[in-house]
Image (cartoon, helix red, strand yellow):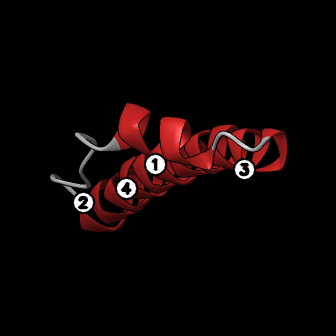
Amino acid sequence: MKFFLKESKVEKHGRQHLEKVMECYLKFEELMEAFYRGGLQAGLRTHKGDSHKGT
């Protein structure tokens, strides 16, 4: 029984990790779009308040 509990915890943490990676990727994609449009400073101001608390 203990094995399955640990396995479910691994699945939960794996899913949380994947969600955080996807969130970071999408923000990075937004920044790169702004960079290539010449609006990098505007893109950085948009994300200035973001943090990685809780990771």
**Residue bearing the label numbered 1:** 20
Q: Is residue 40 left or right of residue 11?
A: right
Q: Is residue 16 left or right of residue 52?
A: right
Residue 40: mark: none
Camera-nearest label, 3 or 1 = 3
Kind of residue sitting beneath label 1: Lys
What SS does tag 3 mark? helix
What SS does tag 2 mark? loop
Sequence-wise first label, 1 or 2: 1
Tell which residue pokes out farthest to the right in this image: 36
Q: CA distance from mark 4 to mark 2?
A: 11 Å
Sequence-wise first label, 3 or 4: 4
Q: CA distance from mark 3 to mark 4?
A: 33 Å
Where is residue 27? Give x, y as percent.
56, 42
For the C terminus, give its image quadrant: bottom left
Kind of residue sitting beneath label 3: Phe
Q: CA distance from mark 3 to mark 1?
A: 22 Å
Sequence-wise first label, 2 or 3: 3
Kind of residue sitting beneath label 2: Thr
Q: CA distance from mark 1 to mark 2?
A: 8 Å
Kind of residue sitting beneath label 4: His
- Give the residue drawn at x 66%, y 39%: 39
Where is residue 7? Give x, y as percent.
41, 61
What SS does tag 4 mark? helix
Residue 13: mark: 4
**Residue bearing the label numbered 3:** 35
Res. 3 image quadrant? bottom left
Where is residue 28? Give x, y as percent.
62, 51
